Amino acid sequence: MDTVSIRELKQQAGTVFQAYRFHAQLDRLFTKTTKTGNPFYELTFADAEETLLLRVWNNAPMFATCGQLRAGQFFEVSGEFGLGGDGRSIDGKTWTARALDDDEAAQVLGGTAELRAKQETDYASIETAAATLADPRLRALSLAFLDRYGKRLRRTAGARDYHHARRGGLVEHVAQMMRAAVQICVAYPILNRDLLVAGILFHDVGKLWENAYQENGFSMPYTEMSELLSHIPLGMEVVNKLWREIHEDAESVKAWEDLEPASERVRLHLLHLIASHHGELEFGSPVVPKTPEAQALHYIDNLDAKMEMFERGYQVAPELGKHVYDRVRPLPGRLISPLPVFEVREAPVPGSGGEEPGEGFSEEEELA
C-alpha cells in the first residue's frame, strides 16, 4: 500500500471504503459526549497541506487506542477510509496508528517532495531578489531581515484560511508576487522596481507573528500581540526596527547621506506599501494606496491570493457536473474548469497517411 497525503486521501475516497495509509501529526485530540451521554473521540490529523477530522465512537475497535494517543505526536495511520454520510467528510471504519521516528516526522513537516522542492526554489528566488536590489538601503534592509527571520519565514503561512494556508505558504506567496512584479515593471516603467520588490518582501512580515506555525508542528498559535495589533502594524514595526539598526552603522550612513532619493523618503514609501496593501480602509489598511507601487502591490497581492484559491479549489471541491465544481469560499461562485490552452497542430503532409478521411484526394476520387 502506497503512502498518500491527506489531500490525496480526500480526493480519492469514495462511498466504497478502501485501504489507505498516511503520515501526519495529531494536531488536536478531544473527548466529547453524544446527546445520549456516550463518549467519543474527535481527532484532527494534519500534514503540510491539509487536515483530516476523524471521530471514533465508543463501540469502535480504535476507541481504547485513542486514549493512548497524544496531540503533537506524529503517526502513520493505516486503515479503511471512505466518505461519510454527508458525502464530504471522511470516515474510518478501522485503523491503526504507529508512532513515526524523528526522520519520518521531519519528512512530514517538510511536506511532499514536490512541495519541499517548490519552497526551496521559491526561498532561493527571494534571496536572489533581495541580494540584487540596486538601492543599497533596501538591499541592506532585505538581507538583514532574511538573515534574522528567514527561518521563521519558512514556517509561516500566507493566511489562516483561504490562500497559501500551509506551513511555508508565505514563502510561495512572496516569491510568486515578486515574479509577477518584475514582469509588471517591464510593462509599466513608471514603477520603481526596487521599491515594489522590497515592498512585496515586507508587506506581510507581521504574519511571522500572526500566522507562524510552531517549530515542530502544524499548530498555528493565537497570540495576544497579533490579535491586538494585526500584521500590518507589526510589519511596520519590524521595518522601522531593522531600519534603525542598519543606520547605526556610521559608515553606511555616511555612504548613503548623499543618495537620491533621500533615505527618509525611501523608508516612508516602503512603510506606505505595507500600510496600504489591503487596498481599502474597510479591509484593514490604515491608509489607501497613494503611489503607483502601492496600487500595484495591492493588485498583485490580491491576484496571487485569488489564483491560489482557484488552484486549490479544483483539487478539493466536489465535482457537481461536467466542468462544474462546488463553490470554494471566498470566491464568489461555483468553479468552472479553466479553458485549456489552444494547441496549434501542424497540417499533415499529403500522402503521409495522416490525412483525415477525404483529405489528399481530388473531388473525382472522393466521389468514385
Image (tube, grey):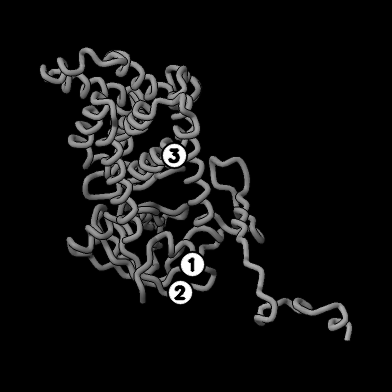
User: What percent of the width, then of the height, locates residue 43?
Assistant: 35, 56
Instruction: Give how far across and how far down residue 120 sits, in percent.
Output: 28, 51
Percent position of residue 347, x then y: 66, 69
Residue 289 appears in view: yes
- Confirm whether residue 325 shows in the render: no
User: Which is nearer the N-term, disc 3 or disc 2?
Assistant: 2
Judge by depth and name the residue closer to the eye, 349 or 127: 349
Q: Amino acid at mark 1?
A: Gln
Contact between labelled residues 1 and 2, with CB atoms less than 8 Å apart: yes
Which of the two discs, 3 and 2, sits closer to the camera?
3
Tell me the quarter of the picture where residue 153 sits.
top left
The answer to which of 109 and 33 lies nearer the viewer is: 109
Question: Residue 305, relative to residue 90: is it above or below?
Answer: above
Q: Which residue is denoted by mark 2 in the rendering?
A: 18
For residue 180, the mark is 3
* Secondary element at tag 2: strand
Residue at the disc numbered 1:
12
Q: CA distance from mark 1 to mark 3?
A: 34 Å
